[in-house]
Image (cartoon, helix red, strand yellow):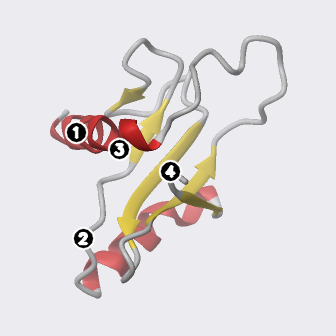
Amino acid sequence: MNHVAFDVPLESIEEYRAKLAAKGIEVTEVVNHDDTPRQVNPTVSASTFVRSIYFFDPDGILLEFASWTRELGNEGDVRHRPATAADKERYLAMAGEARKG
């Protein structure tokens, strides 16, 4: 298993991030997943399909709160291969780069 994702309201993603951080939980900045070659962007754009934050539970399981920005289901919506556990470090590094802008 790579991680467990929970669907949360788009208007609440920043609030949830702030609440986790206030509790001392290490949490990524909001990651804007999009259709660009890097698959993430520091800003929301027309190609952004989900905004996510990532953090670990006490047992070390990677959790994601994900807020969809648009419906998926159109041809071409899935352009990338699914992530695997081997991608963990790369995704965490991309989240850090996205935070820096």
Residue at coordinates 28% horizontally, 45% vertically from top-left?
Answer: 92
Question: Looking at the rendered structure, which numbered label has been put on residue 26?
Answer: 2
Point out the image quarter for the N terminus: bottom right
Disc 3 on helix, strand or loop? helix
Kindly identify the amino acid type of the residue bearing the numbered disc 4.
Asn
**The residue tagged with tag 1: helix, strand or loop?**
helix
CA gap, disc 3 and disc 4? 8 Å
| Amino acid, disc 3 | Lys
* Label of residue 88 in the image: 3
Q: CA distance from mark 2 to mark 3?
A: 16 Å
Mark 1 or mark 2, which has the lower sequence index?
Answer: 2
Pair 2/3: label in front: 3
Q: CA distance from mark 3 to mark 1?
A: 9 Å
As measured in the structure, the alpha-carbon distance from the residue carrying label 1 to the one carrying label 2 is 14 Å
Kind of residue at badge 2? Glu
| The quadrant where residue 46 appears | top right
Q: Which numbered tag is attached to residue 93? A: 1
Question: N-terminal of the two: label 3 or label 1?
Answer: 3
Q: Which mark is residue 84?
A: none
- Please tell me the numbered disc located at residue 2: 4
